[in-house]
Amino acid sequence: MTVRVGIIGASGFTGAELLRLLAGHPDLELVVATGDSQAGNRVADLYPSLAVAYPDLVFAENRAGLADDHELDLVFCGLPHGTSQAIVPGLLDGRRTVVDLAADFRLKDASLYPQWYGEEHTVPELLADSVYGLPELFREELVGAKLIATPGCYVTTATLALAPLLAAGLVEPTGIIVDAASGVSGAGRAPKATTTFNAVDEDFTAYGVLDHRHTPEIEQNLTHAAGEPAQVLFTPHLAPMNRGILATCYARPTRAVTTESLRVTLHDAYDPEPFVVVRESSPSTKATLGSQQVHVTAFADERTGWVVAIAALDNLTKGASGGAIQAANVALGLDETAGLPLVGLYP
Amino acid sequence: MTVRVGIIGASGFTGAELLRLLAGHPDLELVVATGDSQAGNRVADLYPSLAVAYPDLVFAENRAGLADDHELDLVFCGLPHGTSQAIVPGLLDGRRTVVDLAADFRLKDASLYPQWYGEEHTVPELLADSVYGLPELFREELVGAKLIATPGCYVTTATLALAPLLAAGLVEPTGIIVDAASGVSGAGRAPKATTTFNAVDEDFTAYGVLDHRHTPEIEQNLTHAAGEPAQVLFTPHLAPMNRGILATCYARPTRAVTTESLRVTLHDAYDPEPFVVVRESSPSTKATLGSQQVHVTAFADERTGWVVAIAALDNLTKGASGGAIQAANVALGLDETAGLPLVGLYP
Amino acid sequence: MTVRVGIIGASGFTGAELLRLLAGHPDLELVVATGDSQAGNRVADLYPSLAVAYPDLVFAENRAGLADDHELDLVFCGLPHGTSQAIVPGLLDGRRTVVDLAADFRLKDASLYPQWYGEEHTVPELLADSVYGLPELFREELVGAKLIATPGCYVTTATLALAPLLAAGLVEPTGIIVDAASGVSGAGRAPKATTTFNAVDEDFTAYGVLDHRHTPEIEQNLTHAAGEPAQVLFTPHLAPMNRGILATCYARPTRAVTTESLRVTLHDAYDPEPFVVVRESSPSTKATLGSQQVHVTAFADERTGWVVAIAALDNLTKGASGGAIQAANVALGLDETAGLPLVGLYP
Amino acid sequence: MTVRVGIIGASGFTGAELLRLLAGHPDLELVVATGDSQAGNRVADLYPSLAVAYPDLVFAENRAGLADDHELDLVFCGLPHGTSQAIVPGLLDGRRTVVDLAADFRLKDASLYPQWYGEEHTVPELLADSVYGLPELFREELVGAKLIATPGCYVTTATLALAPLLAAGLVEPTGIIVDAASGVSGAGRAPKATTTFNAVDEDFTAYGVLDHRHTPEIEQNLTHAAGEPAQVLFTPHLAPMNRGILATCYARPTRAVTTESLRVTLHDAYDPEPFVVVRESSPSTKATLGSQQVHVTAFADERTGWVVAIAALDNLTKGASGGAIQAANVALGLDETAGLPLVGLYP
């Protein structure tokens, strides 16, 4: 079976990562990639890394009817937050799967959009239809899904660190701290004063303190896992590296736990998973570089009574475009691992 | 007044940083620098960055009587943890000041050494005599001090973030989390599998989870500030950069606080300080690079009820050798800022 | 057809890269990987990046008869220079292919070994039998080859930049300068004073000036391309990055050339090649990261009368392990591109 | 003596570096710093690294009469190339010294501006009056100079590598190749697609091949040193680091030379210089980080008949703002080393 694939908004980093991964996918065939600011330009000129895989591909301009005209079975939407909700409704029809990489269809509670994103959602009725694209939590719901919301990169990391512990009732769902660091690619391709080499290299800083938009999404997932309302303080940091997120999460145990008992719970949850590895020591982002892997671990501190859960992944692969493809694989009934790199690039 | 200075153990990074700073100090004159593994080698061959400042200096071998023979007024001890306590007693006499950069004289409670450092202290009777070399907390005690223990790099960072808030009774002294990231120079000059460029570059990872040795030292300082026992869970991370520590600290408020009220407290504490700057947004390590500056801020999160305090500094300057010189300046009655860079290297 | 593969000396970076690539190779099946210093350890503990692909693989100890006992069809030898020549003769038999990644079988003139490597070759009679593993120059010779010498990483870069220009008689084979920069992984996994993060990060330096061992190998290739003796001055530099080599090569034209005419020659040579891309501007190493791609270009400077040819590649992929697999693919009659990543990891 | 100093165009990296160095200069007192795009903003908000040294300084707007109104004795002009020539004539009067950091007054031959900078010079009559601000070559001319042109960063590097060899007649002035790599700060503060962290980190690439604007300036200096027309092919590269330039230069000897004889010539030229160090092995940029140091060496290759001369420096310190201050010190009769860091920041 060959699935005809289009990418709307392919000129950003998640678009480039989709193109990288699709080049090695046995079932998904890229038909068209749009990028309005780059329309007419060769993909290989913007991303020479794609020169061998896509020597002739040219960015198209997005337009109404594009998906129909190209008979697309699967559309990835790599547009900025807030613009997907204007485009996606027009893409949905009975036979086509739409995977959105923005935040527009992630939150189930429409009232969270004005609170955290500063704007009312324009098609709140679609929020109930979208399936959250994290197979480790929603694999069954994803089968046959027509609208998939790809999780935020920090969100996938924090969720996979904490969800099994919450689901097992081992830690309290409130008072949680997620302290995370990300590589710079999470900020996107557009040059900004805060993302120049000279600003970032040899620097480590926090940003979005108290109000980062991934907060309600982490809470939504942890609430789902815990079965009761979760509350999280999330502090992201910018680390001088291209890719990678490490989330160090702190929660209070509900009862006596040990490092060993926490890891047994992680193994129970993740040993069946194709991409999640339970580590005996802290994960490192670099072990996941360019791959779909997620590395997790947990510690119980008897002295202070805290549980520490740590996860690492590549924010562009499992944390974005790889996550989108994994969800699409599940939705379309393909091998869940198809086209997804199992091995990190090291060193 | 010219103070005759020696460095025992000058071949490591804190030694090289002492040499860098002493080259610009108006009152301290370097007389001898030992480095047993490098004895006989030119300093400028090991550290070409010092070639103009010390064209002829050769590492000496340490030996009994060296401080007397060179008529040293001031000795910096840059030896590894555990070895200082064997050397320092022989250096102490009535007229000489000894500044130790290891952990050997930092903890007042001798029983903490076997617990956190794995060995009994050999001269516990000296612990009461040593003064903790953090002028922001112990300026008066440092005047005339003969034995000074330079704080750990993470410790200075976390302490300066939290101490004023604890001293003002604004946050609880227990349940505190210190989540910090450091550049690689904190691990020292010796090549290790974990500190090669290929291991570190493009990586972010936690280490020393639950049991890092700076934990009891942070607790000692915060207990001092709070006036009651403090307890801290400390998680260090390794960031792909040469220098810099950022500590993001989480504590529970004791009463209603706002971001503004927290910063008023920080300003009250730090506006008189020559090196500490209260920032309106997250500090970044790079703003302090190569300088004695400490940048701090704090936030109150009404939603989750957490206080977040953040501090940044250069681990080798204010966090080690610059801190040692600042304490020595105070001890000797010199201008506290003498020889200490006020400006960070940017970019 | 499934080819049974062993790696002797798999614990270094070229070994890890072979494991990464073999995990995605459709025809090559890894059977055994030795690593004497790591014997008995899990591969995934040394290289967590391989945790999903090789969850249970353990480094074996090398021993006589290992290749026979495992019925290996193909052996990659990732041992240090000078040690391969002791092992390889024992691995050769009529049906098995041996691909050496060291320098031991690269130079055809045995007298070059004492001159550049400081030791006589112990099995010089094998030098004539080995085929130089650069398909772009020796594709026909590689078909059915039983002993393949994988080129040096700098050598592949410089050769691919210059060979077509020399073969076309456009530039002089003598007076050539190859000025190149490499990421740190070329120096191998073992920690050294010169490869710590603190030594390398924010540094750029030359090394091996005048006497780098890749010099005679570059000359051997360029002599082959030119059909007359080539002479090269090669200056390598260390750049603060993990992977990647860029070679900027300077040669004198033999007759009037233009930038356009040089590029026509490059296109003629490389458009049929699966991995080589001719660029209109300077290649960048990052566009090739983790892939088998080689990017090349050339310029003619009318003003000074120099030709500048530039090439970039990933030193561990095309420059080492990927090059070894490409050569093995050709030798064994497989699809030449099998298992080799076409897309660079960006960013 | 206190010299009243203004900086026109202080918001860029060379401006920030001037501010860093002036903070430690005993004789130069900063009175005003303009930055049109930042006018009214605190310097410490744009550059938190300057927060302690300049807590209250605000960027002023440039305007006619500013230098008179502030009674400036010394003006540093940190404006972009091409804009200095519009401003500088209005700043010149009999008693004031103007140090331009742009290219506008560097080239003596006005016809080179349209050729290399694309525009006619608007005040070519001033070119003869300006003194080239490289004390190592023009110390005597700088004494009392009223208009000083600070050399380009690559130019200082290449000139100091080669000038003594040319002055001694040891190498030919034509056929020279300068192959250099620079950190990213040379590209300035403004965000560009080519200077984002994600574009630069883990990348090495050439740029400005054949036509970089520093070429005629290098040739002007080498012509001066040689006493006959010099010709140079200059290839710059971008290295993933903040600061630092290494220039590897290739020239043909005029007669039999050895590595030793080349170094004797370098020592003769540089041992009296306060900032230039002759090394026995390749310089590294990091040894000069943040300091005024220049490290140089040279090699003679008997095999190929090339001379290799290598120099390293910090492009923002000795290569720009430190160079400007050094020249101003000479012009004003101050201690030439005043305010200039002798020690590099390591690691």
Image (cartoon, coloured by chain):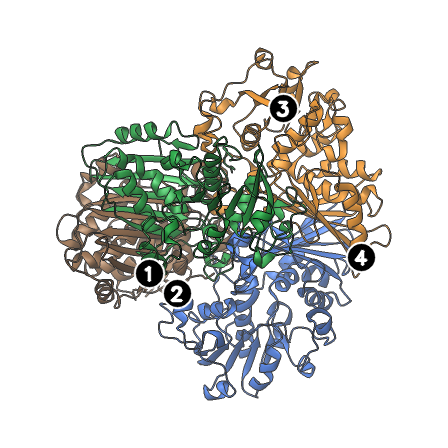
Chain colours: A brown, B green, C blue, D orange
Question: Do marks 3 and 2 share a subunit?
Answer: no
Callout 1 touching callout 2 (CB < 8 Å): yes
| Amino acid type, label 3 | Ser
| Amino acid type, label 1 | His
Chain of the residue on which disc 2 is drawn: C
Callout 4 touching callout 2 (CB < 8 Å): no
**Which is more toward the observer, A76 or B46?**
B46
Could you tell me if residue A211 is visible in this image?
no
Residue C330 position, x and y percent, is: 55, 74
| Amino acid type, label 2 | Pro
Q: Secondary structure at mark 2?
A: helix
Chain of the residue on which disc 1 is drawn: A
> Counting other residues with Cα less than 10 Å from the Cα at mark 3, is it few (<14), some (14-19), or many (20 or more)?
many
User: How far apart, in angstroms, are the residues tagged by discs 3 and 2?
Assistant: 55 Å
Residue A29 position, x and y percent, is: 38, 59
Callout 3 touching callout 1 (CB < 8 Å): no
Of marks 3 and 2, the one in the foreground: 2
Dot 1 corresponds to which residue? A295
Q: Secondary structure at mark 1?
A: strand
Dot 4 corresponds to which residue? D305
Dot 3 corresponds to which residue? D84
| Amino acid type, label 4 | Gly
Q: Residue C303 appears in which quarter of the rendering? A: top right
User: How far apart, in angstroms, are the residues tagged by discs 1 and 2?
Assistant: 9 Å
In the picture as drawn, the residue positioned furthest to the left comes out as: A228
In the picture as drawn, the residue positioned furthest to the front comes out as: B94
> Counting other residues with Cα less than 10 Å from the Cα at mark 2, is it few (<14), some (14-19), or many (20 or more)?
many
Residue A327 position, x and y percent, is: 28, 58
Quick one: quadrant of the N terminus of chain D?
top right
User: How far apart, in angstroms, are the residues tagged by discs 3 and 1?
Assistant: 55 Å
User: On residue C48, which mark appears?
Assistant: 2
